[in-house]
Image (cartoon, rainbow, N blue to C red):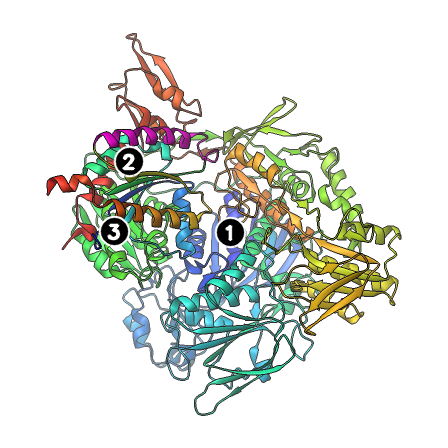
Amino acid sequence: MSKSALVIGGGIAGIQASLDLADRGIHVFLVEKDPTIGGVMCRLDKTFPTNDCSACILSPKMADCAGHPNIDVLTYHEVQKVEGQAGDFKVTVLKKARYVNPKECTGCGDCLAKCPVKNIPDKYEYGLVNRKAIYIPHAQAVPRVAIIDGERCNMIQKGKCGLCAKNCGKGAIHYDDKDEVITLEVGSIIAAPGFKVWNAETATEYGYGRYQNVVTAIEYERLMCASGPHRGHIVIPSSGEDPKKIAYIQCCGSRSEKKGWKKYCSSVCCMYAVKQAMITKEHGDLQEDIFFMDIRSYGKEFEAYIHRGEREYGINMHRAARVSNIEEDPVTKQLTVNYTDANGDAVSDVFDMVVLSVGLVPPEGAEEFAQTLGIELNEYGFCKTSVFHPLETTKPGIFVTGAFAAPKDIPTSVAEACGASAKAGAYIVDENFEPCAPKVYPPEKDVEGKEPRIGVWVCHCGINIGSVVDVPAVTAYAKTLPNVVLAEESQYACAQDCLESISAAIQEHDLNRVVVASCTPRTHEPLFREACRNGGLNKYLYNMANIRDQCSWIHMHEHEAATAKAKDLLRMAIAKARLLEPLVGAEIPVTNAAAVIGGGITGMTAALDIAAQGYPVHLVEREAELGGYARNFRFKEDGVDVQEFLADTIKKVESNPLITVHKNAVVKDIPGYVGNFKLQLEGGEEYPIGAVLFAVGAAAYQPTEYNFGSDPKVMTQTVAEKAMDDGSFKGKDVVFIQCVGSRNDKVAYCSRVCCAASCREAIKIKMADPTANVTIIHKDIRTYAFREELYYRACQMGVKFLRYNESEPLPEYDGNCVKVYDATLGAQVEIPVDTVILAAGIAPDRENKENLAKMVKVPISKDGFYFEAHQKLRPVDFATEGVYVAGAAHWPKFMDECIAQASGAASRMLTVISKDKLISEGITAVSNPDRCDGCGVCVGCCDYNAITLVEQPNGLVKSNVNAGLCKGCGCCVASCPAGAMEQRGFRSKQIIAEIDACLDFPVGGGE
Amino acid sequence: MADFEPRIVTFCCNWCSYAGADGAGVARLQMPTNFRIIRTMCSARVDPEFVLRAFAKGADGVMVLGCHPADCHYIGGNYRARRRIALLRMVLEQYGFDPKRLKLEWVSASEGEKFQKTIVEFVDTIKELGPTPLVKEEN
């Protein structure tokens, strides 16, 4: 067998990295030091900017990991020693004693009831509640089994007690369990240990730990969460009453040189604070104030999210307001927040609660961890990487992903996790590589001619459904419907325990149909279908009622009507389920080659990563040269000339025998489907490919402001960079104007890169001539993560930063002076200039994107960038299978981010093109020859040429559907005048059953 | 007529409009509860029979939502749906139904707001038109 890969850390980054490797056919050990995987993400309530429930979107991935035949999930294990080198590591792992055998434990919780040791702070709940010495980490834990805290257990420490063992019906508890040491042999390693939240007690001025009503954001996340200590009811800690006023204080622990604080920006706090404030408003009416220096909404759709928070939710945003201290009223426990407002005036305001937006710091024991792995850390204690190699640690064969490399959000972590798995996979896949054998399912039960026996699960989804829809009533109602033999409620239907109980119930209750009323089939159908398969039921005998996205979330204040609607939707789903039939998908051969559109840094990186695993790539560039926009970069990154790196990369690409470069090439069309596309170029060439990546980048905004183009004093950052590089830059009185072509009426988004670019250029100017007057006029400075260093250095070197209000028009410029209202001074200022540098943003290049989008039917967001399958967890996938996106085509981003995302897309593509065959959807059209008159209406109707008329031996002509070509739209079915054409999974009688079930009953089904 | 709550059957295609409806949920856009969604893979799967069936069973209104022109996940399904619905509205009129009771609209996967607006407007339209003529006859 080929070498395995090791992933250290079971948060979202580690989970995604494991899944991608496993889907590539590589065996994975996923080592997690805690008793459950899920990391920090599974403790969050909602996620920005979609406000998706964190547990809802993560649980399927956790379940995937646990159920994946190629992944060994080793929870409560810790890596102790790493020996060897890339391709051949020997890893010593400590298997910590759980004292409960996870194979025997059913997670029933009976053992917990009698445990007398009750006062242990629950780490999962950040100490907000206590747990016992034996405990189950949380409801969605994977694996969901009990564990004994050996240091606190009376039986283990003193040999007295043993109540839990007596209470366990399965005999799963073993007090004599011992730590064990195991050895793993792996080809490569991905480090994803995540991060830790900053210790807020360091900020003594804010009184955390002394004032009861000051909480950290991560604690607040648990307080908001339906699965948290207060079941999602937000209360003032000191009184238990509903808060009327909450303050959020940003940059707690970040962006400061104070002792114990961090200089860098933690990247995610602005967004999570606005999210928390928005969600809190949904819990009840109250006043909320956010105090911050700059709002850093630089990510995809972030700017619009902040505006929504401010304008629709009425959150008070206090810009440039740093809170000096907080005082507590000893009697009422209310908190006085003292701050300096934007005008420089001292202000005090009283709040019921204060939430500290604490920053992200390296994970516990990062230094020791780095030593064990033999990798270096950077000056901030995070994993050391470089701009050109953002996923590589300093040791070959060991890669990094997630927040261990720098504070970052979930989508970035996911994309990078995919990328790290592409890199790690390259050390395992060689010419002798043998992929893992596919998963074996229990044989599918024969349901032919049997009366339907339907099992129904109705999900509370925490409070997402349960707080609006009366779930017990819906469940009780389901029991009254024909053929329903089982109806159960579930806190989270997508959690591992519920999925297992669905599989088990199929056997126990001899179910032959399963219906789940929860969220949307678009995200969760695959998960429940998998549970059906695990129970020996054909996956097409499953149906779903969407009572969350299309019911509880859009009728939040209409409990009765929403409950009635949920009953109707469930009744309709059951009516269809009754008529479902088992289907078998066709086998589709896969072309083991890929195409990458766009020959910039992103496209070239992806092409190299795919080729590194032995698959041919067609790289299509519309210009005469490879390199893309990076050809304009003149500054060094990490001491390396960008142009040198670029030339080196181009050389690697052009000399790689597996990469075919098509320059001056325009894509004409990309017909086909996943595994079987054809790349057609304008020149008439055609190449079969299995997957395609859109790495077409974006465009520089061409300013129409400030007489750009006619006034030689006015230039863009790119032009200025070139001038500084070749020595022709002569500016002595320089003004940078930020957000030209961004964050305005026409272009609502932030272009992400311009703030750091201006800071960098300002530093260069000051270094060349310390007497130069340099001013940066901005709305916010968005030098997130370690880029804060640039802002800091620019300030130190005497660059002036002048903030103007977001609502104001751009500063004026008369050819000699820039005039602007300085929001901090509260006065109009005039700055004489000899050079004006415009931070011209990134334009989407929409037209080029639309042309390609039409060929494969993928959407474009309202800002003009590609719209991925899921903003949080599928950042480089499109909803259309086999098509991917990376780099600036997805959203404006820095070069290191493009490189990491490119590797991520390469990994996703490898999961497709490395397979010999895919199994198609079973939902295809089928013609009934007994009813077909051979009229041929269906033939003309099919855009995929999947239908042909075939002459029968008896001379009659009948239509015939090629299941491999059929995409399952059902258009031909609706067109057939004879009723001969049918769509599997959407048969006319099934849809009519839904219509009848909807309308044959009164709303809500009647009593 | 003030307490008339219309019953509306809404057909959504899997790729755009159903995703748009989910998007409305994700954004917590609030709207009336009068509609029930039936998912088909493409708006072109909506057989005229389904629409007539819904009206025959007492629906006060029927909506068919698909991908925007040129955006159909299945190349041109939505164009076929558009032609069918246009014809069907003429048929409905002959049966004595106001053709406004059948609506075709394009909602993309990213248009949660448009989904909300479409629902709100259609519910208003049907409330103005009153209950289905079918029910009146039975009374």
Rounded to the nearest angstrom, the CA distance separating label 3 from label 1 is 30 Å
Q: Residue at x 71, y 49 (%)?
A: A703
Would you name the residue on which mark 3 appears? A456
**Magenta region, main secondary structure:** helix
Say which residue appears at 55% left-offset and 41% top-offset.
Answer: A884
Q: Which amino acid does label 2 sit on?
A: Pro
Label ID, residue B120 = none
Please provide percent x and percent y for residue A880. Answer: 48, 39
- Which kind of residue does numbered mark 1 sit on? Gln
Chain of the residue under label 2: B
Disc 3 marks which amino acid?
Val
Q: In this view, does A845 lie to the left or right of A869?
A: right
Q: Quadrant of the N terminus of chain A?
A: top right
Q: Residues within 10 Å of mark 1 (few under 14, many from 20)?
A: some
Q: Do labels 3 and 1 share a chain?
A: yes
Q: What stretch is highlighted in magenta?
A: B69-95
In the image, is A709 to the left or to the right of A732? left
- Foreground residue, A9 or A942? A942
Residue B29 counted in the magenta span: no
**What residue would you read off at disc 2?**
B99
Q: Residue at x 35, y 70 (%)?
A: A231
Dots 2, 1 in contact, CB < 8 A:
no
Say left or right for A13 vs A232.
Answer: right
Indicate whether residue B79 is drawn in magenta.
Answer: yes
Residue named by callout 1: A871
Crowd tier of the residue under label 2, counting other residues whose Cα lies within 10 Å: few below 14, some 14–19, many 20 or above: some
B65 w.r.t. A470: above or below? above
Q: Quick one: quadrant of the C terminus of chain A?
A: bottom left
Whether tag 3 and tag 2 are in contact, CB under 8 A, the answer is no
Q: In this view, does A672 lie above or below A64?
A: above
Q: Residue furthest top?
A: A955
